[in-house]
Image (cartoon, rainbow, N blue to C red):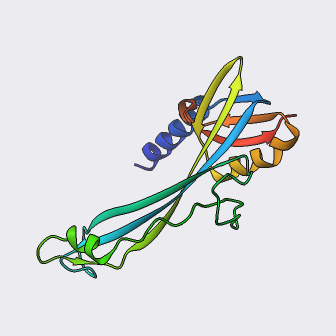
Amino acid sequence: MKRFLLSMMIGATALTLISCSTVTTNQYEATALTTYTWQVKYAYDLANEPSPRFETFATASLLNRNGIKPPGAVIGPDDKGLWWPTLPPRPSVSEVEQRKKPQEQASTPEILKAVEYKLTYTVDSQQKTLPTNYEVYRQVVKAYPSNTPLQLTLGVDNNSVEKAEVAK
């Protein structure tokens, strides 16, 4: 059993390494979509419900580009250098009650924060936009003002950008 698990892990690691690649580019843009969303939890027993129901209400988003303060930014930069939109309107008691089913309880509205990172880059006249992470976003923010070439490490099947480093 141990040999089987070990061989599976080695195979998965090899497959991951084989299906990743690197590209170098000096044409790139990183974006971070910051979003606030009001959410309410509904359940017959809020404290012990194994699978409560969640409803979302108002949402507000703001697109950050290369770490530059975007128009409409009212909060920030935060500890990660991100700018945030104005909070969307909190749901009223009536709105929360309208979505309640008979016998259900509703939690207090909670504001959720989310960030979606993407990197757009051009190689050989082809532009691609892929999901990425905070570390890549920050590397691009630092490199962008001087247009420093970056070496990008792409994820499995080249469907994401996992790493960005100054090209050597």
Q: Is residue 14 left or right of residue 122?
A: left
Kindly identify the residue that appears in the image at 35 percent across and 79 percent down: 108
Q: How many marks?
A: 0
Please state, as top left, top right, bottom left or bottom right, where the C terminus lies in the image: top right
* Vertical comparison of 141 with 81: above or below: above
Q: Is residue 96 left or right of residue 19?
A: left
Q: Is residue 112 left or right of residue 23?
A: left
Kindly identify the residue that appears in the image at 26 percent across and 79 percent down: 46
Occupied quadrant, residue 37: bottom left
Q: Is residue 146 left or right of residue 63?
A: right
x, y percent for residue 118: 60, 42
Occupied quadrant, residue 24: top right
Kindly identify the residue that appears in the image at 65 percent across and 59 percent down: 73
Depth check, front residue: 152 or 59: 59
x, y percent for residue 26: 80, 30
x, y percent for residue 9: 51, 43
List the single residue furthest toward the top.
124
Depth check, front residue: 71 or 75: 71
List the single residue furthest toward the left.
102
Depth check, front residue: 72 or 97: 72
x, y percent for residue 128: 61, 28
Kindly identify the residue that appears in the image at 66 percent across and 59 percent down: 83
* Vertical comparison of 39 with 26: above or below: below
* Vertical comparison of 118 with 27: above or below: below
